Image (cartoon, rainbow, N blue to C red):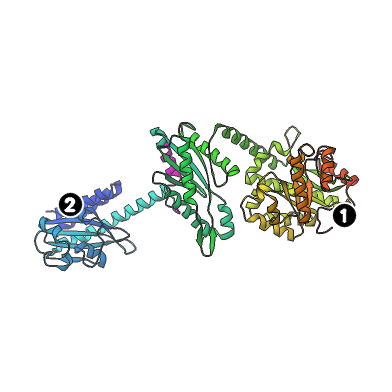
Amino acid sequence: MVTDSALLLRLQTEVLEAVARGESLASTAELLCRQAEALAPGASCAILVIDPQGLIHPLAGPSLPAAFSCALDGLPIGPSVGSCGTAAYRNEPVMVTDIDTDPLWENYRELTGPLGLRACWSSPIVDKHGHVVATFAFYYRICRGPSVRERDIVQTCLHLCAIALDHEHSRQRNHRLAYFDELTGLANRGNFVEMLAQAVERAAPFGLLLIDIDHLKVVNDTVGHIFGDLMIRTIAERIAGAHPDLVACRLGGDEFAILVPGCSTEACLSEAACTVIAAVGGLIQADGQTIDPHVTLGGALFGADGIDAVALRQNADFALYHAKEIRRGGYVRFTPDLRTSMLERARMVRDVDLALSEGRILAHYQPIVRLDTAEIIGLEALARMRMPDGRIAAAGEFYAAFADPRIAWQLTGQIMAQVASDVRHWLDIGIDFQHVGINVTSGDFLRGDLEQRIVETFGQANVPLHHIALEVNEAVFMGGSDQVPKVVRALRERGMLVALDDFGTGFASLTHLLSFPVDVIKIDKSFVDRLGDDMASDTIVGCIIEVARKLDMTIVAEGIETAGQSAVLASLGCRLGQGFLYARPCSTHDTTRLLSSFAQQRDATDRLDKRSA
């Protein structure tokens, strides 16, 4: 005869094998109930799980009608919620030997009466932290309590239930980690890749939107990663809630993706993008900090813009990259010409990266002169690249690579190092020398270390900062980063000049000159080209010169190529300029010869820096 111990051991073995095989929690629980009922004739077994909100959900009850289990679903645990709800609430076994008279069942007898259930003994199942996660119950059709044998059975079942539930919790956690982003709860990159592949395989119309959070690094650097994470979570919630049909995923960092099912037209994709942009808007506030969040989107349509997952995603990425350059906070849809320009840019990035590593990035200098005497009062350092065949390439041939923040940062570092060395040499040989302008990009400001780099680079070469002018163009000034005016102000306080470069080509206006902390306004070549032939250009340049004079700022005209242009500028009150009429950008050696012959004397009154004039 088989002993009770052997029967319980068989029960335990069968249930643990089901768990090890990866059977679902529901099927494992049903197996446990049936085996327990076989060992305890006259008892009907039920297992209920308790969710984190304290609500009851049936898991297994093979001998009980489905309608009975459904009636329990969603009930809150409490001090008088039958045997199971009360056991979960108290975290202790509850034995009711007569349901018809026990007050714990007062509100639930209509469920048990028709089934002939007269008694119920329920025990809580706790996790490793001691929290109730389920209950295990025996129902009887006569008024009675459990036998000693039944107590042993239930004790074994409670242990097995705890193991199965813990295994399921671990499985769900691993699944969440594998397929969902921990910070936002959205589908993660791996999940997105699978969903995108499935959407392509179905071949039904859909659109793909790729999203970047604007200036997340600036937020992390200025107010900290805790606020940055809050910003990511808030934007994720807003994207996910933008529309029920949109499938939102977080790819990592500041990157998100959205699948737009049923989308087959440009208008549909544009509408989805506008919906997301509108949903993201709205201030985020915490701990006295306020951020106005913005996102930039690029989109592509399945079919029209790619028939496989790789092409579709790459084309949406091209569109996003383009949007970040020309339409921050907006949306751009992929067009075939974007692929060509992006691939060309990628080639330029590779070429410049190689040139940086091989020391083939050089500084050439273009003189800034007095228009009346052609004396050199300053220089602008311009990046050049020596090609493998020895040819010197102008910046226009590789300018697109500067859009890569890493490339821009490294290139600025190499140019600054050469400028520092050259300036030190000119000072050492006694050249009357005033200033060199160095150009910086958004990438230099976003790193957050521009001031430190400038101070260290020129400090190591023993070059006073009043010999250096920082040239910042309108796009960088107006780019929305709070770092730009802060760094510019700090460098001016250290004695550096700051020039607003290419004025008139971007978004700045004359009114912005009231708030820009600059010393020099450089009028863009596009205005100079039309001087003398276009009355509007003459008027605009004249206005700029007059406003700058009243604000005590120095004006430098760029791109002067003819004596006629120089004469018009002089008549309008402009005293300084640069361009091919006077000198093309040239090497350090040639610049040294020019300075030796044409540098303005130190006691002259025309200086870039009116603060020291």
Query: How far from the left and from the top, in percent, is residue 577?
Result: 81, 45
Q: Check disc 1: other Cα within 10 Å, few if <14, some if 14-19, many if 20+.
A: few
Query: How far from the left and from the top, in percent, is residue 70?
Result: 21, 53
Residue 601 seen from this side: yes
Viewer-closest of 369 and 24: 369
Query: How far from the left and from the top, in percent, is residue 135?
Result: 24, 60
**Which dot marks residue 605?**
1
Q: Residue at x 21, y 64 (%)?
A: 81
Q: Quadrant of residue 83?
A: bottom left
Is 101 drawn above or below residue 576 in the view shown? below
Q: For residue 189: magenta?
A: yes
Answer with left or right where residue 451 lies relative to residue 462: left
Q: Residue at x 84, y 38 (%)?
A: 564
Q: For residue 289: magenta?
A: no
Number of disc labels: 2
Residue 62 seen from this side: no
Q: Quadrant of residue 390?
A: top right
Q: Check disc 2: other Cα within 10 Å, few if <14, some if 14-19, many if 20+.
A: few
> Quick one: label 2 or label 1, which is nearer the N terminus?
2
Answer with left or right where residue 127 lies relative to residue 151: right
Is 318 drawn above or below residue 520 in the view shown? above
Viewer-closest of 1 and 314: 314
Q: Amino acid at mark 2?
A: Ala
Q: Secondary structure at mark 1?
A: loop
Marks 2 and 1 sit apart, C-alpha to C-alpha, by 97 Å
Q: Secondary structure at mark 2?
A: helix
**Which dot marks residue 67?**
2
Answer with left or right where residue 461 lies relative to residue 239: right
The quadrant the C terminus occupies is bottom right
* Magenta highlight range: 182-197
**Which dot marks residue 571?**
none
Query: How far from the left and from the top, in percent, is residue 39?
Result: 15, 55
